[in-house]
Image (cartoon, coloured by chain):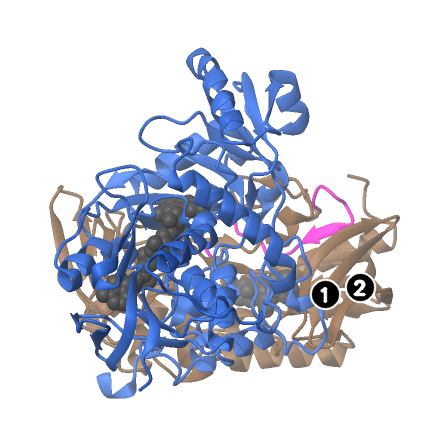
Chain colours: A brown, B blue
Amino acid sequence: MSAPVIDVEVEALVVGAGPAGLGLATRLKASGVASVLVVDREAGAGGNPRHCGHPPFGLREFGRVLTGPAYARRLAERAVRAGVAFRLATNVVEIAREGAAIVVTTTGDDGVRRIAARRLALATGVRETPRAARLVSGERPLGVLTTGALQAFVYLHGVAPFRRPLVVGTELVALSSLLTCRKIGAAPVAMVEEQAGPQCWPPFMALPRLLGVPLRYGAKVVDIVGGPRVRRATLAHADGASSEVACDGVLFTGRFTPEASLARAAGLTMDPERGRPVLDAFGRTSDPRIFAASVLDRSVETAGWCWSRGRAIADHVAADLAGRLPPP
Amino acid sequence: MAIADVAIIGAGAVGCAMARRFALEGAKVLVLERGADLLSGASKANSAILHTGFDAPTGSLEHACVQAGYAEYMAIRDGLNLPVLETGAMVVAWSAAEQAALDGVEAQALANGVEDVRRLSAAEIRAREPHLGHGAREALLVPREHVIDPWSPFLAYLLQAKALGAEILFGGDVASARFEGEQWALQTPRGRRRARVVINCAGLYGDLVDRRLLGASAFEIRPRKGQFVVFDKAAASLLRTIVLPVPTERTKGVVLCRTAFGNVLVGPTAEEQQDRDGAATDEAAPRALIARAVEMLPALEGMPVTATYAGLRPATEEKGYRIAATPDRNWITVGGIRSTGMTAALGIARHVYGLYEGMGRSHAPAAAPEIEPMPNLAEHRPRDWSEAGHGGVVCHCELVTRREIERALTGPLPAGDFGGLRRRTRCAMGRCQGFHCLARLAALTEGRFSAPLATPPEAA
Ligand SMILES: Cc1cc2nc3c(=O)[nH]c(=O)nc-3n(C[C@H](O)[C@H](O)[C@H](O)COP(=O)(O)OP(=O)(O)OC[C@H]3O[C@@H](n4cnc5c(N)ncnc54)[C@H](O)[C@@H]3O)c2cc1C
Ligand SMILES: Cc1cc2nc3c(=O)[nH]c(=O)nc-3n(C[C@H](O)[C@H](O)[C@H](O)COP(=O)(O)OP(=O)(O)OC[C@H]3O[C@@H](n4cnc5c(N)ncnc54)[C@H](O)[C@@H]3O)c2cc1C
């Protein structure tokens, strides 16, 4: 790779066109920042909600209940109307600091580009903790995935990764996975939760009951067997007993973790507890020219929450560009 | 169908190198692999260290094959576009007892012809590896121990064999065979094949294949599992050199090293098991490995884990390789290639060709075939994403492009299953393990694999 020259310079560059990045970019533009560019590796803007063919999205932003894709489209249209520029299907691969500017290297079908920016905002979102990082034992058959991947199978490609999965976890996203399973006619064999009670608002747990999905608390997946596809999983129960569940997939839901690899590779100071950069009150990282908008302090937030968080950070970025933010 | 000169049972590391060597020597080669793709057995998971043989039993066949394999890999790798991550290794003594043992390790290295080793004081260790734990007392530096991509070389070897006319049969489980005096008739689910000589490179099934087809086996496979933990790419900046323990009788012990793909690896364990197929990980071993890694490299504390995996060594009741010819049955057994086979494969293949010649057989060597350079998967060299026209990135964590996926699914030896696609491209092997790309991969591979990523609708 011959180091390409810088092909565009902007006031503010936003990595990630999810609710946080779009909220941030739109607001920045509205507050008069001359050039705002959003880069996202997906072919369309909107972030994770693009894959969520289910409601509820948009109460906070649009005052009505939308499906994820409809919500994503609206947010993206707003940004375009506000004058935000986009580079989609473009991955940010590196963040470097050159003099006063932040220089970001990207790759897309058109090759490697470099973008210089006075301020950079990371809105790279979150993902679920996959099986490997949970250190779940067993073999590696097909059919072990996360909700995010399931949604992409179903809503983007219209195919099913399994028919009788075991669902692991009871965060909100686990409940959405039950609806997604319904969409493809998949019948979860059980929903299991390691803790003694649900990890979402308890009345929501009526959903698995309604759908006839057996629920087990205090149960942990300790083994996965199969080849080429999952055949069964072993559960360890709180009382010390163990049991086997026949299934053709294992769906690991929730345990969101920030998509912080760019920040980590850029050498920003990380908060090891939260797995994201250390931030000050204005959302600045250890390099005060770099802000982070997608954060995760508890479990996953709603898209609406991320959107308003993006807007709040936008005000700090705008103030900083105008020289009105206190030094770190 | 024409009679092959040799039938090679198994397309593991050893079988692939064997196919290449025999094809280069001019033999008509047949490869019978029961899996849907190459490297479906022991060879799918290892530490990926290209060994110098500094710690091999002096004068053993293993020692000779490791060194010959190393030399040949270095000689051919440029032509095939295969990477070497030049790391060097340090055998680190963490205790007084280990320190005392370093003399013996050094003496063995010298006896093994690895003469560029040298001792490092604690201060020199720190200068070379500032992040290493302070308990490191002294080390033996082995400058030419390196890290490679453990999969691409074997694909390249098989592609070379294929370019020279070899027939390669996947799903070709050899269930029975009959020796007809001059030749073997081998029965597979994909039909019958004939060959003059059979070379058993069946790895974890080597003893069973000998017993079933030849009638007896000189050894017994005792699968020995090795579990690994892979840390996030952010860890790669913390370490340059492979960190080896002072070896014990039983195993090479737990290694900490970078991978060619830009991660840091810790492992393997050594656990005997009966099962020859299931290389399952468990929760305790990875936890213990992580703890050991943090002891060695404290900055790994809190580092995200990208993956855990396990491999099975085709160990036997003895330490050495179990390679033997049975000339009156036109049979050569290449078994018990336990823990150095990735390095030694090319050397083993040369040795076995010598045994074959010893059976009074020879051919007119072929000209080296032209094959396309291998796609580069190593992080320290330019990856496909750096060249325009790649069709976009499909796997974001490992930056695998659409062009790379498509290339792996076409050509003379397309990926035969999802594991094969992962080994050819690294797709879905990164930190999100498919959160982002699995569905896209299901769509891109539709109709390609007998075990598809998406379940067929009729299963509903
Ligand atoms: C399965 C699932 C179901 C959910 N259901 C709901 C729901 O019903 N209601 C609700 O309110 N919320 C829901 N959520 C939560 C909601 O989707 C997230 O909180 C929200 O999308 C987070 O917004 P974000 O902008 O921070 O990140 P994201 O939406 O994840 O956007 C991040 C963007 O950054 C891009 N990106 C990351 N790294 C790079 C890079 N290196 N280069 C270029 N681009 C990059 C990504 O492509 C992505 O588009 C759900 C989440 C999941 C996973
Ligand atoms: C944990 C671990 C770490 C290691 N680290 C290193 C290292 O750092 N460096 C190094 O050089 N080496 C290393 N090795 C060793 C190396 O991986 C092995 O020596 C090598 O993979 C053995 O290859 P093989 O071809 O003999 O066996 P296999 O890979 O098992 O190949 C045998 C093939 O035969 C097929 N087969 C079996 N029976 C039949 C049948 N009846 N019909 C048709 N096909 C059949 C199987 O499907 C399989 O593909 C390591 C090994 C392990 C497990």
Q: Position of residue B52 (x, y in %)?
A: 52, 39
For ligand 1, the image quadrant comes to: bottom right
CA separation, marks 1 and 2?
6 Å
The answer to whether the beta carbon of the residue marked 1 is less than 8 Å from any atom of ligand 1 is yes
Position in image of residue A8 (x %, y %): 85, 68
Residue at 53% from the left image edge and 47% from the top image edge: B70
User: Which is nearer the eye, A256 or B286?
Assistant: B286
Q: Which residue is mark 2?
A: A114
N-terminal of the pair, mark 1 or mark 2, is: 1
Whole-percent x, y for residue A267 in the image: 68, 43
Q: Is residue A8 left or right of residue B135?
A: right
Extent of the magenta region: A285-301
> Residue visible at 41% across and 61% down?
B18
Q: Which quadrant would residue B358 be assigned to in this image?
A: bottom left
State left or right for residue B23 relative to residue A135.
right
The kind of residue on which mark 2 rests is Arg
Mark 1 lies on residue: A106
In the image, the residue with mark 2 has its CB under 8 Å from the nearest atom of ligand 1: no
**Where is the C terminus of chain A found, in terms of image quarters?**
top right
Helix, strand or loop at mark 2 = strand
Residue B368 falls in image quadrant: bottom right
> Taking B261 as reference, is B176 above or below it?
below
Q: Is residue A8 left or right of residue A15?
A: right
Residue type at mark 1: give it.
Thr
Mark number for residue A80? none
| Residue positioned 33% across, 84% down in the render | B2
